[in-house]
Image (cartoon, coloured by chain):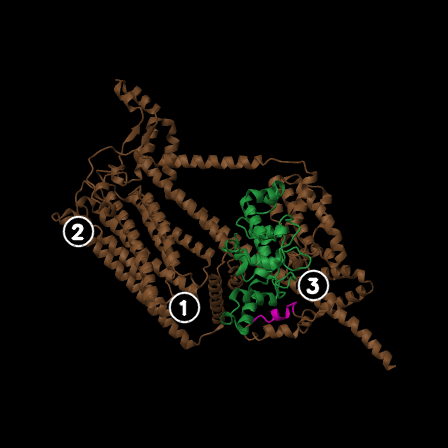
Chain colours: A green, B brown
Amino acid sequence: MGTTASQLGKDSLSEYQELTFLTKQEILLAHKRFTELQNRDERNHLNATRVPMEKILTLPELKSNPFRKRICHVFSTSEAKDGSLTFEDFLDLLSAFSDSATLEIKSHYAFRIFDFDDDGTLDCGDLEKLVNCLTGETDDTRLTSEEMRQLISNILEESDIDKDGTVNLSEFQHVISRSPDFVSSFKIVL
Amino acid sequence: MARSVDFDLSHTLMEAGLESPADEDGVHDSFSRLIAEQSQSEGQSAIELQDLQRDLEEEGQDHVAHLSGPEYREWIGSDDTEEEDNERQTDSLIKEPWSSATMKILSSMPSRTIGHSRGAIISQYYNRTMLLRRRRQSRPAIKDYSRSARPSIRGYGMEADTTDSAERKQERLVNNLQNLPVGDRVRMLRAMPLNLAEKTKLRRLTLETNKLTRSSSGLLCCSRLKLCIIIALRHSCTSTGNLPPELHKNREPFTGLELLTGTGYFSDTLMYYGYYSNYTLRSHMNNCTENNLPSSAKRECESKYPSYNMPLAYFFTIGMVFFITCIILVYSMSKSFGQSFRIDKSHSMLAMKAFCSWDFKVVKKSSVKLMSENIYTQLKELLAEVNQRHNKNTALQKLWRLMVHGLAWTICIAGTTGCVIAIYFSSDYVHKQRAGNVSGGSLLKEASLLALPVLVSLINLLLPGLFNLAAWMEEYNSPSVRTYVAISRNLMLKVSVLGVLCYHWLSRVAYNSDRDIYIKTSSQCWESFVGQELYRFLIIDFIFTLLNTLFGELLWRIFSDKVLKNKRRPGFDIAKNVLDLIYGQTLAWLGVLFTPLLPAVQVLKLLLLFYIKMSSVMMNCQAPRRPYRVSQMTTIFITLLCFPSFLGASVCVTYTMWSINPSESCGPFRGRKTMFQAGKHWIEELEKENPHLSLLARAHTYLVENPFFLFVGAAITLIVIYFHSQVVDGQRKIITLLQEQIENVGKDKKFLITRLQSMHEQKKTPKRSLASQDSGC
């Protein structure tokens, strides 16, 4: 633990504490877990190197999550849009999924995770993918196309206030604000 | 989010909207101006576009319909027959073969960029810091209100413009952040949905020039004040709880059965009404009595030291308990009403299910699969429910249903009536038997006290089963209706059972207390007897709940796991459990007057019950397959707790205080005609001692004993409630108006986009037709 702390540096540690919803222990744990994912020679340049998405997805916390790839893509700052994460991106991820993150920030990132085509709004395609992720990959739990059509038209009817056929961020947050247990379920703890 | 984001030309739009959200003209006008501004960079095409816009304004929305893409039509279209709302298919902006320019504008709409682009987020937070500053400090400089800082269509229209102004926006944001107190700044930075690198940059920029550090002393002061208040409250609570008892009597030996019956060892303790004395206790009383002082000096000496008037203390403690409980209940009721009626009619069950049901904490592969399956079945059930809503029954089916409902209600009412009659006669019989039968083992006699509570608890346990059977026969479609029916039936049962018991205690036992019919000796006071009865009811209710948990849930789970080998587990019936809690609470409220320590017993019981139920739910029950509308249900339960439960209990207690003779030989009110007279007596004594307080006495006679003021108070409460309901009604109307307005804005957006698209097509076609003409020539 001592070595990782010295590697991280006191300044950056306090800075991370101030800018994220994580505690000191959580940041140190995240650092430890992140360095485990890095190659041996990369460990000295913490923020310079990116860990590719495939490696991030080996984390048991993400491994079986159906939204794992979306999560990586949303939090990645990579230019190439390959979903690779730096340590800071990793902290961002954990901060948004942490206990003390606000409903607002959680719903913001949830929206971006569910926005599969990254066009800033949830349209029918996004909703279909979202529902498919929720019901799982296997064929026996997949909704039929008729059911899916009905489901999506109902979702839009319920949440699309301006009737433009898509759910935008404000409408999404409006729905989320009524759900009592979203904050407790939108969590990943290392 | 969107509150801070609006179109740049929103002034006209908002004004038009405020007069009437349906005022299409004003809205369209503002948009034509908007389009003009947008397309100025495109030069000549602007005028053309404006003309077209004006032309089409008269023709209205109908034109938009046929422009909808065929693909989307197919998607929603087959739902046609059920959907009354045909408009919504046409009002879609997606899956249309847009041209690239339209796509560009579409993708840079504020509603789409807000969660996305860095510039939008920065300006959003700029606005927020602005608000915070405005609230916290003196007004900022006017130049800070610059328009370009707001997210605007103008800013998003052109790529170059966005990047350019983003720098300026960021500068302004940093400037604002610097002026915020440290705590707010940290909170604001933390809550920004930007990535860490950006946030680090912002923080460094903020810290660079910032030397202004404000301590959060105001906050500290506040919290200290809060702590002080809490401590003071706690002190006052404990001090009012200490009622000095009458010191006397040898106790009966402890056998163990007392824990259930509450008699014997417990009967002459602080637990019950009969133990409290009717003295006025004075500290340093001895000093005054020892010296042989003249009576005037003695009175002076007595009045110098604080005295403790036992009956008055008893009276006011009970009164305060009910008053405080009433205030807390009304407050929480109003709060939960506010929560559940904040929203309009739609409950958005499906959307909530889709957006919020995934639990990201779940890690194991098998659990993930299980959760997927669960969500799948839930979605299917919800869909089936939505479909069922559209089905209409024929007249014959309706008649059949009506008959079934009538039969079910008859069964339930008959069952309840039977139980009530049984309790009515058995309560009489059991106690007469017990009082008359002097011989026999004392243990058996003690145990026979438990017969009535056991009977009532059995009824409470078995009758809901009958109700469930009736509900199963009725086959309700919607789960909410089923829950409401179950709640009302259970409520009917509990209210009538408690009503009969109250009649038994307050009329039969209290009225006949001097005739030894129900109570074995006249030395025992009927108040203590009723207190013991309530204690027994509470304890037996607790035991039955425990047994129900053990046999109904644990053993049933084991049986169904081991023998039946199916995975169906009993569901946790929230409605029944909450009603049980309300029943227990009503017993506790009823008993406060007769058993001052009953609330303590109730608290202990609730604590135990909570942990036992929690572990039982975790171990034995399966999650309900239908989501529970938490806020709405909470409102209903709190209303039930307030209305029949608390109101009934307080009416009973007030009736007892007001018009029933207290026991002659025990309790703080012995020798008085009613308990209420304790206050009057005290006032009279006070008047005798200091004659200039006669005003107070007169006020007391007028205010408390005159029913007129009671009516005035009730009327004022009713008026306040009426005003509040009117306010809520108005807010609901405003919500619908605003929603309409949002819809109209959406329509406008749609209209503009289709115009833009047709513009582009027309721009292309003339060229093409010109070219064809050329070739033709």
Q: CA distance from mark 1 to mark 2?
A: 45 Å
Q: Is residue B290 left or right of residue B212?
A: left
Q: Say which of marks 3 and 1 sits in front.
A: 3
Q: Residue furthest right?
A: B777
* Magenta segment main secondary structure: loop
Query: Where is mark 3, residue-wise?
Result: B106
Q: CA distance from mark 3 to mark 2?
A: 85 Å
Where residue B705 sits, quadrant-wise, is top left
Chain ID, mark 1: B
The amino acid pointed to by label 1 is Tyr
Q: CA distance from mark 3 to mark 1?
A: 46 Å
Q: Is residue B213 left or right of residue B453?
A: right
Q: Start and end of the magenta stretch? A: B84-94
Question: Is-magenta flag for residue B89?
Answer: yes
On the question of residue A104 being in view, the answer is no
Secondary structure found at label 3:
helix
Viewer-nearest residue: B278 or B465:
B465
Where residue B94 sits, quadrant-wise, is bottom right
Query: Where is mark 2, residue-wise?
Result: B432
Q: Residue at x 70, y 38 (%)?
A: B209
- Disc 2 crowd, CA 10 A, few/some/many (<14, 14-19, 20+): some
The amino acid pointed to by label 3 is Leu
Question: Residue B476 got which mark?
Answer: 1
Contact between labelled residues 2 and 3, with CB atoms less than 8 Å apart? no
The amino acid pointed to by label 2 is Lys
Q: Residue at x 67, y 74 (%)?
A: B66
On the question of residue A91 being in view, the answer is yes
Secondary structure found at label 1:
loop
Viewer-nearest residue: B468 or B422:
B468
Q: Are marks 1 and 2 on the same chain?
A: yes
Question: Residue B293 got which mark?
Answer: none
